Every structure is written in structure tokens, then in C-alpha cells.
Amino acid sequence: MMQKLIIAKQALFKLISGTFLFITSYGLSAQTYPPPSGVYCSCGPTTGVGYGSVNPSIAVKPFVKGILVRVAWELVEPTDNNYNWSLIDGQITAANTYGKKISLGIGCGIMIPQWVFDAGAQRLVTPAPIVDTIAVPWDAIFLNKWTEFISALGARYQNDTTINLVYITTSSQNGFEMQLPPATTPTLTAVGYTDAKMISSWKTIMNSFNSAFPNHYLTNDFHPVNGSDVVADSVYEYAVSAIGSRYGASAWWWSQHNTTVYPSQYVILQNSTINNNFTGIQMVKSGTLDSAKFGPGGMPAALQLAKSDGICYWEFWNSDILNPAFDSLLNNTYCTPVTGIKEENDNPNIFQTYPNPANDKLYISFFDNEKFQLKIFNNLGEEVLNCQLPNNSSPATLDISGLRQGIYFICIITDKQKFYYRKLIIAK
């Protein structure tokens, strides 16, 4: 992500004076390109009217690395097995004109074609003031038609290199994010909602996207579902195991209020920066039009929070990218990904740290007869803890209650001046 090798070294050079960190390469098993990173535009949808998502006034800006292209399923497949690929093809052509990449999101949910319901898919109607219809996410007819579409989408675009990220979407409140409508007719209870059914439907959809796009990075937004965090936690765990290094989490609600608004999903994102090559955010609002929504410091402070968490892919609203007041910020911003740091002496058995994520206490077990100096650095390379640990205190207990939640790096220095590193996430 964003010149990973250079940037990671710049931010972490303070770790140990005179000691070199080895940064892993990002050659991956299937794809031959690095994870998407930098400034992307959360631009308007592509509907066949106007220029679509690839806004020329935004695409021409050099700091814009790519465009989120959103297209409704009902526009791409207006009738069963009848595809209109021209909307997506046109955006790929436009992006190539400006040398930009595409993150592709196909809107489901309220953008499900009418013929799917005509075929018998069970529907949920959202109430006024915006009356709309989505399919019951675990409905067999919906799942069959949606996975058929995903397969056709992959058959056409799985080798396209302008598209470097594909959003996993399903039937949800707005067709892109994870949450379900807070009230429907019939109610979720009436149609037999359970977390298990929701999780199973997500697994089906994820398997379909994974098969359709074996060469692309895949992601999805995380929200609470029907007032529960169980679905999000289970879906993330499954995605990591099923998709592996091509998968990462996204949040389309990013502000400085993450710890209080969606604390469980915030932890998912922090875990994703450690375990996956891609993690992304979309700003919750426009920093130009709704600065107060971000908390103190506005959108620039929210961007800094993402960077401090090691999140290096950021989707901004049109108005912010077009705002001259943000030109310097967006043109000069860079990020330190937390993936890619490897122990200088690759011996994972020298010590263990747990739990990870941690909260107020960190425990360290040693498997050697040396004394250890321990240092903890934050994601900016600043030392936040330094202590001497005798080998006979194993397991040692560290009080880390004074550290705010985020991504950290543990460095162990032995009496023989060997250095070992671990990544640590602190979740309050």
C-alpha cells in the first residue's frame, strides 16, 4: 500500500538504532499487484446518465489513486441472464484514460431487480419516509440468482487489471453496507431471522465472490446486524480463513467516534491491519459539508486516526477531493501499513505474548535463559514503554492500561543483542 517498502521504513526507523528491519515483499499467490491504497473517491453511482462514478474533475487530480465505481444490480442485469456490461466497461475505459484504478461495488439490497421478486424471492419492505424493498438475505431464490450474477460478473472481469478491489455485497439496508433495516414489513422476527441464517448467507456470498474473482482483493463493510455483533465477528473470521491474504475489512462509517459508535467493528478493522494485506475506510461524511460529524479536528483528524491504525486505503467524498483547502492534505499524506514487518531473527519460539488483542494487561512467556529488555512502539515509531524483564519472571505481566487502543510493535532485545518483533493490537 502506497510505496509500502519506503514508507514502512520511514515510520519505523526509530525502532532500534543501528538495527535493520526486514520488510516482506508483497508478491502474492494469485494477484501480481500490491493492495489498493491511498486516496480514492467515493464518487456518485454509475447509472447511465452523465459520466458516472469516474468524475473527470476528480480523476484528473494526481493524488487520486482510484475511484469507487458503484453500479446497481438491476441496471446490469435488467432481466434474468440478460447483462448490460456497458456501464462497467465505460467506467473501466474512463479510469484508464486518467491512469486510475477502480474499486468495484455492485449494489444489491434495494437495487435488486424486480424479476428476482417475480421469481418468488421473499421481500422485506422498509417503512416511510423512504419505502423500499430488499430480499430476505437467506432466501434460497435470492441467493441462487445473486450468486449466478456474481459468477457472470467474475467471468467477464476476473482478469481485468484496472479493477483492483471488489466489494462483497449482499441484500442489506442500502445494498453495500452490512446492516439490515431497523424495521421492515414483515418483521425480521416474522421471517425467522437468526444470526446463524445471516452468517450462512454471508458465507455463501463470500464463497461466490472468492471463486469469481481469484485474482483480486476482496472486502466488505462491517456493521452490527439486527443489533448484534455476532454476525460481523463470524463473517470476518470466516473471510480470513476462506479468502486469506486477498481479503481485508472495510468500514464505511469512519470518524473519530469509532470506539463508541461501532467498537466491535473497529476491533475487526484493527485486526485486519495485522492479519491482512488490505484494510480500508470510507469517510462517514463530507469534511467540507459536515465537519462536525467527525469530532474535534474534522476530517483531517479522522484521516490521521486511520493512518495511526495502519489503514492505508481511504475513500473521500467528492466535495472533499474538490475542496482546494484539502489539496495539500491529500496530496502529501502517506501511510505506514502494519503488515509486512518480520522478525530480524526469525525464531517465533523465543517468547510469546498474549492476549492479542490485549486490553489492560499483557503477558509474556520466555523460553530462554537470558534477560530481556522490552520496548513497545506505537505506529508512528515512537517508544511508549521500556522495561527490563528477567527470565525467571516468566510469564511476566505488563500493565498497558495507559496505552490507547491501536496498533503497536513489541521489540524484545536479549542480552546477546538479538532482536525480535511482534505486532500487538490494543482494544479497549
Image (tube, rainbow, N blue to C red):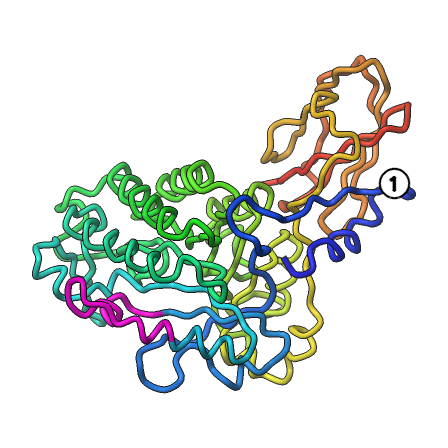
Q: Which quadrant, please, contains the N terminus?
A: bottom right
- Is residue 51 positioned above or below 239 on the image? below
Most foreground residue, 392 or 272: 272
Q: Which residues are magenta?
A: 71-89
* Image position, residue 179 (x, y; %): 33, 54
Judging by the rendered image, the residue that carries numbered circle 1 is 19
The answer to whether 407 is drawn above or below residue 372 in the figure is below
Q: Quadrant of residue 372?
A: top right
Would you call the spot at circle 1 few (<14 residues within 10 Å), some (14-19), or many (20 or more)? few
In the drawing, does residue 46 fall left or right of residue 4? left
Q: Please identify the quarter of the rendering in which residue 99 is found.
A: bottom right
Q: Determine the residue positioned at 19% across, 54% down.
A: 145
Question: Is the C terminus in the top left, top right, bottom left or bottom right quadrant?
Answer: top right
The image position of residue 183, as x and y in percent, is: 22, 57
Q: Residue at x 33, y 75 (%)?
A: 87
Q: How many marks?
A: 1
- Residue drawn at x 63%, y 49% is 26
Q: Between residues 287 and 73, which one lies in front from this camera angle?
A: 73
Residue at 52% across, 68% down:
101
Q: Position of residue 262 (x, y in %)?
A: 46, 51
Q: Let me know if residue 110 is in the magenta part.
A: no
Whether residue 127 can be seen here: no
